[in-house]
Image (cartoon, rainbow, N blue to C red):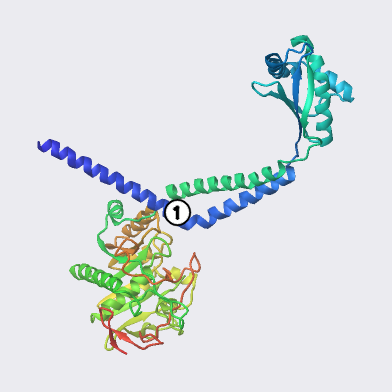
Amino acid sequence: MSESRERTENSKKIDEQEKIDIISLLDDFAGGLKKLWLLILGLIIVCAVRSYFATSFTYTPQYVASATMSVTTPSGGGGYIDAESARQMAEVFPYVLTSGVLEDVVAEEMGLDSLPGSISVEAEEGTNLLTMSVSSNDPQMAYNLLHAVIDYYPEVAEFVFGETRLEILDETGIPSDMQREEVIRGSYKRGALQGAIIGFVILCLYVVLHKTVKSKDKLKRQINLPDLGTLPFVKVKKRRTQTVHNLCILNDRIPDSYLEAVKKLRIRVLKEMEDNQMKTLLVTSSIPGEGKTTVSVNLAISLARQGKKVILADCDPRNPSIAGLLGDEGEHPGLGEVLRGKVKPEEAMTKFEVSDDKYMMILFGGESNTEDAALLGSKRMKSLIHAFEQQADIVILDTAPAELLADASVMARYVDAALYVVRYDYTKMQKIREGVQALDMSGIHMCGYVFNGDKKADRGRYGYGYGYGYGYGYSRYGHYSHYGHYGRRGRLKDTGRMEDESGRVIKE
């Protein structure tokens, strides 16, 4: 009895798994269609236009001249005999034509070497009516050929079924091309169908090859890292007075669901750091655009609001992004200038208020400079991180993508722990594994990962239109900088309002 129940439960699990896989496959196709619909539409239009013009320029008109005739016998039998004669003439015609006798006679009469067209004969069942059609690329030739065949066909076929007469009852006269419009119209339909088929093949290849992460469950099975939380996908309404909005928890338009998710992430990260007596946290991702800078900034703000002494450093010299996310348009000495000894660390630090009596210290990235990346593994970088540890409870370092560049792995030697950002439906699993392995080989403690921009989390509870961008940098390798409208002291320039830890307004 128990074995039967166990088999039933296993069967249900298998059915549920298959159902989930089908739904996942449909979601993949829907997502692929959403991303590739413009390409597919373009293929359909291009193929339709190409087929239309190709057919228009290469189309050869075919003129069909036809005549309906009655078949009679000189003996005057009529009725069944005449109908049988018409049927026999229609059946025998292909053999008479292929034998070459009729063709030679008609060609000689018309002064031609061969018949310039095709001929067919059809008998109407139960009658003595015979319809003969001749097609040619010249209308006059089609008409002349029709009459020549009508005149000589009975004579050539007489030895087969005796003497017969053909009397024309109706004919088309000199024909015109009636098929051009239909052929041209059908050409672009066929071209559009070809484009749709090509587009569907591309869509299938995209779904098969573009295996991005859409489920935390699959992510857990593929990488051996603790799950530190999920940040839901959020769209922020664009105000008339602002040109760009950023996904920063200082923004009063951010929904409570996102604020709560950041809070949970902060609690878990802080617990992991304190349990292991760690102070420095490196935040990275596999590739640009996954939101690592957004996570770094929001995590730092959340920790500072809790009263922690926080230092946030932009350690991506190629594409410094923190200033853009916070809307700070001022000029600040960057990390590169500090590492080259041009500016003292304390002079490069900027005090950034996150509430009335709370603040954090920020080392902005300064101007983009690829050469500064070589300094990330230097002794000066090690000394700078050590100095940060003496001044703060927690130091957050926003670094370049781990799978794309070696910057994060180089810095990992001087940092206690790492937080890995994975964006929903954005990165292939292979790149995630390679990025995690690159960090793991450096010996750094992997705190875990955060699943960013999850569209399946709390679906329908938020969303206002106008999406936000991830990454906020990466103009050198794929994305562009965005600038918000927050003040240098952590307040919105247009409102000046302040918020508490939950995101509620505490001062206007």
Residue 387, visible in the rendered structure? no
- Residue 133 found in image quarter: top right
In the displayed structure, would residue 40 be above or below residue 1?
Answer: below
Q: Nearer the viewer, residue 439 or 121?
A: 121
Identify which residue, 377 or 192, lies in the foreground: 192
Tell me: 506 left or right of 469: left
Q: Give x and y (percent) for residue 193.
A: 57, 45
Depicted 238 relative to depicted 14: above or below: below
- The residue tagged with tag 1: helix, strand or loop? helix
Q: How many marks?
A: 1
- Tell me the residue at 59%/48% (across/down): 192
Q: Could you tell me residue 163's position as x and y percent?
A: 79, 12
The three-letter code of the residue at mark 1 reads Gly
In the rendering, at what x and y percent does residue 170 appear?
A: 77, 31
Left or right: 187, with 154 as reference point: left
Name the outermost residue toward the left. Answer: 1
Q: Quadrant of the C terminus?
A: bottom left
502 left or right of 116 in image: left
Res 357 → quadrant: bottom left
The residue lying at 75 percent from left, 16 percent from top is 96
| Local crowd size for mark 1, using a 10 Å CA cut-off: few (<14), some (14–19), many (≥20) | some
Query: Considering depth in this image, is 380 or 173 the residue closer to the camera?
Result: 173
Residue 502 visible at all: yes
Residue under label 1, please give it. Answer: 32
Where residue 201 appears, as percent x and y from the top left, is 50, 45
Identity of the residue drawn at 88% across and 22% down: 109
For the N terminus, which image quadrant? top left
Q: Quadrant of residue 450?
A: bottom left
